[in-house]
Amino acid sequence: MKIALLGNPNTGKSSIFNLLTGLRQHVGNFPGVTVEKKSGFFTDGSQRYAIVDFPGTYSLDPRSLDEEVVSRVLRDPKNKDYPDLIMAVVDASRLENNLFLFTQLYEFDIPIVLVLNMWDVAKKQGVEINIERLRELFPDITIVSTNARLGLGKERIFGGLKSIKARKKNGFMGNVIPEKADDNESKREKAKARKEKIETIIKQVQTKSKKTKESRLDAFFVHPLWGYLFFLGILLVMFQFIFSFAAYPMDFIDSSFGHLAHWTRGVLAEGVLNDLISEGIIPGIGGVLIFVPQIALLFFFIGILEETGYLSRVVFIMDRIMRPLGLNGKSVVPLMSSLACAIPGVMSARTISNWKERLITILIAPLMSCSARIPVYTLLIALVIPEGYFFGFINIQGLVLFGLYLLGVIGALLTALILKLLIRNKSKGFMLLELPGLKSPRWPDVFASVIEKVKIFIFDAGKIIIAISIVLWFLASYGPGDSIHIAKENTRKTERYSKANHDEKLNLESSAGLKHSYIGQLGQLIEPVIKPLGYDWKIGISLITSFAAREVFVGSLSTIYAVQEEGDEPKKLIDSMKKEKRSDGTLTYTFASGMSLMVFYVFAMQCMSTVAIVKRETQSWKWPIIQFTFMGVMAYVFSWIAYFILA
């Protein structure tokens, strides 16, 4: 039996879905659209049920892509997702608002189980519902109550499924619209009439004995000053945790895969297979898994904020700021998340129902300076910005770092404004939001959400990341003919090589081989293009290799300049870069070229993991290609301007 799980947002649908299915669930997309489809199955002993958790919906008169999907499925019996049964979930503490969608569902000839969820919240707020009277008003459906957030009500749902009643199309509204009215006027009159009828039902089935205490908290959470300050504090705590605690497992994953690659190289016989596994596949897998701690921590915090109901308050206060830019109040979480890593930021944009606003958020998220840029910024600032203080206490280098972050934020917001004018969308942007009751989080739902997001990243984006890693390994390991072999032989004959220690010899050979590899030759090929920015072919190679991940820039330069890093600070690398000269004898790394390079990394899309996840989220290569292109153009133009002004 196919069940459609339907209801308004924030009614606890996901809690009921998780309660029934456990981990027997799958996340995909509805055919032809980017609306998320969560499906699963469960059994009640004798009967097996397939259940689809549809997006939260306020009405079957579509005003968003999510609502359009729900409406299309229910109005087409030939659709493969057309249900045998509707499980309509309503928030018992907000019955009147939730009945609007339910009465629309009631007009179909599909059997219905009405689930009055959040029964505990309703009682806490003094709301009492006369279920027997509700059953008298809707005699041909099954009605059950649950507290899914607390794990209660599963057996009552099973009992309701065994007592399903056959139904015929029900004219709930009757003939309430004048025949001569135009379509728009007819729709307005019919909304109005439905609400009036719902009000008469509520008077018969619901009583409220006391006022809610939440109004005082909400007055603080959505306050025009304290609301923003409190949210800022939440963000600071959140990102401190993500930056601080994610670093330990990330370092562990990084070192573990480094040791695994080293061990593999020693165990397997020398040859192409050894190189492919130890230099291509293992680092590729490590490059996927290293992001898992950040993704898991971020979605753990987002899950808590969502479960408690606080996230809806954030969306409400931020909407007034984001709306003029073509964004949505819900865009703030993905954009702030992207300061840690654009990957979970892009993934968290799913909460935005309007496709245009969601797409703009996804496209600008990588412009927020992520943690992967920090090694690049740190190296270049130490290289070209002198140490010192303004007014005796403002660190100059710290000020430049702050400026780079600010430049990324400004670039993201201005790009959003331009994309708002360029991207066409038939559905008009709006935000229909009902603030859910404040409550403690249901931890199984929080952890289920974290596991789901991590699985999506590993198995969907991971395949693309590993494939690109292998391609990059090939380009850096091979060259035309015997060019790499000859280059290494010539290096071994030099005086510098003969005086070097073992590690330095390996780095000298690696540097010579890289220069004559396919990617090295590509770097020399693009040198005329990047020369106006103040870069040489060696920087060109680093730009190409750091497409895998921005922090690869430092490692690539280390190899190119054949130096050995000591400790955490790349001091020897900085010394070599400071002495590096062009063919005309001028220094390669000047204040102008260094600032140009920093600006380039602010805007350039140099993270294949993000490209992969954008492809996954938009279900098309079109948008990641457009994103890669416009960010590349921004990087080139603004870094050229920086070099032209400062040179």
Image (cartoon, rainbow, N blue to C red):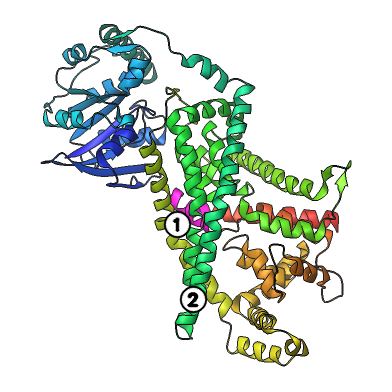
Question: What residue is drawn where x is 45% and y is 62%?
Answer: 464
- Residue under pointer 2: 263
Q: Residue at x 44, y 82 (%)?
A: 268
Residue 352: give x, y in percent of width and height.
Answer: 47, 36
Give the x, y percent position of residue 525: 67, 74
**Is 622 colored magenta in this rendering?**
yes
Q: Give the magenta-colored segment's residue range.
A: 609-624
Residue 95 position, x and y percent, is: 32, 17
What residue type is disc 1 on?
Ala
Q: Amino acid at mark 2?
A: Trp
Residue 425 seen in render: no
Q: Residue furthest right?
A: 391
What is the number of callouts on the image?
2
Q: Alpha-carbon distance for marks 2 and 1? A: 27 Å
Residue 87, quarter of the rendered image = top left
Q: Circle 1 sits on which residue?
A: 461
Q: Residues within 10 Å of mark 1 (few under 14, many from 20)?
A: many
Q: With respect to residue 291, does 350 lie above or below?
A: above
Q: Which mark is residue 62?
A: none
Is label 1 in a helix, a strand or a loop?
helix
- When the figure is inspected, residue 42 is found, relative to residue 92, above or below; the finding is below
Q: Of 153 and 144, which appears nearest the observer?
A: 153
